[in-house]
Structure formats: C-alpha cells, structure tokens
Amino acid sequence: MKSFCSDGCIVQYHSPIISHYEKEEKEIRKKLNMTKESCFMFKENSHYIQKTLEKPQEVWEDVNELGEKVYFFFSTFDDKDFPFTMIIVTYLYQKIPSFVFFQTVSNSEDFIKEYQRGHKIEKLTEFFDKKDLTAEEKTKERKSNEVQVELTNDEMEGLERKKSALLADLLQKRLPSDIPFENFYIYDAYAASTIENPDEIYAFKDIEGDLIYVYLKGHIQSGISFYYIVLCTKMMINQKETSHEEVLYPILSFPTLDGKLSRQYCKGEKISGNLKN
C-alpha cells in the first residue's frame, strides 16, 4: 500500500498521470474534430460524478504504465435535453474508487470508444460484491515469497517520488506512435529476463543523488523487435533477524519500439554489455 504525507502529496505523486489524461483528451478531441460539446456544462457536476462513482453503468479494467489496474467508469444521463456520458478514470481500493485521475463528458460514441480500454467487466454486481484478499490471506501470500522486503514509510514515499519523476520523464520522451500504455501488460513477462540477462546495464544519479540502474534488452515478439527497459534502485533489506542483503528493486519498466528512446536511457556509467541492434 502506498503511504503519503497528505492529500497534497497524493495529488503531487499522481500529477504526471493526471496531466497525461488531460493532454490525451485534447488530442482525442482534436483528432475527432470535436473540441466543444453542448454537454461540457456537466463535466464538473458533482451530482453526476458521484452517481457514476457509486453505480457506474459500464466499467472497463486496464493496466497502466506502472503495471497498476486502472478503471474506466461510464454512466449515461439525459439532463435538460442534453444526453451525455460521464467518463471517469479511477483507482479502486477494496472495489471502492480511491483516487480519480480524470473525468470528462461526451455524447459522441467515437469519443467514448477511445476510453473503452483493456477489457469490459461483464458482471458488475458480481465484480463489486467480490471481496479482495483478507489481511490474513495477503500476509500468507507475502510470506510465501522467498525474500521479504519490509520498507519504512519514508522508504516507500521515496520510491513513489522516484517512480513519479521517472514516469513524468518517460511521458515527455516517448512518441505517440510507440507501444500504447494499455498494452504494456502484454510485455510484463520480459521484465525478469531483462534483469537476469540484460544486453546493457547503466547507472546514473537522479535528482536526489541516488543511483538508478538501467537494464536494457532487445527482444522479439511475433516477429517484431522491441526493447524492454527496467529502471531499478538498490536497497538494503533485513534477511531473517541478523543479516542484511542488498537487493535490486524495480521502480518502473516498459517496452518500446523506439530505438532513439532506448538510447536516451543509455546514460551515466556503463556497467556492462553492448546493446544489440
């Protein structure tokens, strides 16, 4: 679970993703030639936002660039002869909206389809009634791992800051034509092999002066070549009660078709390898 110092910290941490969705909406509207709609007056309407959050008529589940599940809520209303659909992008915690990244409205089917990402939740009642793992079940699952990583609140906040900064940097560098964020999960299986057998490893200092390790590896899937990049840091963890061990902790990982983007992460000290073409 993430640990934040205040509501302001939460917003600050998520600000790159919030900005991403806001920028994306402008691009979609420009593409569809619909920068203005008569239903815009309802975009900030708390009544419709709350109704959509409490009982959405349609939900899609997707995985974002951090490997986290993001949910797209849809509800259609007809107010004062202005039919429209409210669209909300949110995290869920215990099947309850925990942080809203973005909301907008539209009466355009083409625009709405742009936000129907990942897979549709077919049985909403069953989905929202199904409980997540209990604390005891989560504890058993965690203890089944060979290495136990116990982080303090300060360490967790530090990692979240780094993840936010690295994500913001990626959003600025990547091309719109690169692999879509919603498809990142398809490449998750390449993270382990990239760390275990990288083509190249680099280490550079972030703005806080800490070393960030860059693991790069070229892969081929369905005849298409791409790079997978894992950004990590090293942390000391308690191994049993008396010993300590330094482990590699992944912060952000992603695939890319863009060779120029991959080369931008070849910076700092080169530790090993020669990146394949």
Image: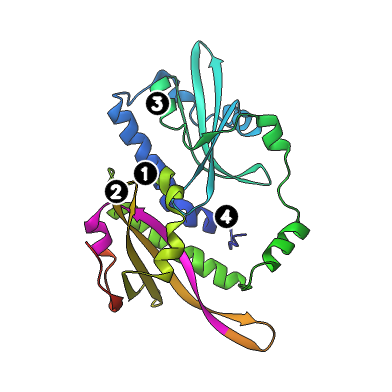
The foreground one among 86 and 270 is 270
Say which label, 1 or 2, has the lower sequence index: 1
Q: Residue at x 58, y 61 (%)?
A: 4
Do callouts 3 and 2 mark residues in contact (Cβ within 8 Å)?
A: no
Kind of residue at badge 3: Phe
Do callouts 4 and 3 mark residues in contact (Cβ within 8 Å)?
A: no
Q: Secondary structure at mark 3?
A: helix
Q: Position of residue 143 (x, y in %)?
A: 70, 68
Say which label, 3 or 2, has the lower sequence index: 3
Q: Residue at x 61, y 34 (%)?
A: 53
Q: Nearer the viewer, mark 3 or mark 1?
A: 1
Q: Nearer the viewer, mark 1 or mark 2?
A: 2
Say which label, 1 or 4, has the lower sequence index: 4
Magenta highlight on residue 197:
no
Do callouts 1 and 2 mark residues in contact (Cβ within 8 Å)?
A: no
Q: Secondary structure at mark 2?
A: strand
> Which image quarter holds the N terminus?
bottom right
Q: Secondary structure at mark 1?
A: loop
Callout 1: few (<14), some (14-19), or many (20+) C-alpha neighbours within 10 Å? few
Residue beneath disc 3? 111
Q: Which mark is residue 224?
A: 2
Residue beneath disc 4? 7
Kind of residue at badge 2: Ile
Say which label, 4 or 2, has the lower sequence index: 4
Q: CA distance from mark 4 to mark 3?
A: 31 Å
Main SS, magenta residues: strand
Q: Nearer the viewer, mark 4 or mark 2?
A: 2
Question: Could you tell me if residue 108 is visible in this image?
Answer: no
The foreground one among 227 and 31 is 227
Q: Position of residue 253 (x, y in %)?
A: 42, 59
> Which image quarter holds the C terminus?
bottom left
Q: Which mark is residue 180?
A: 1
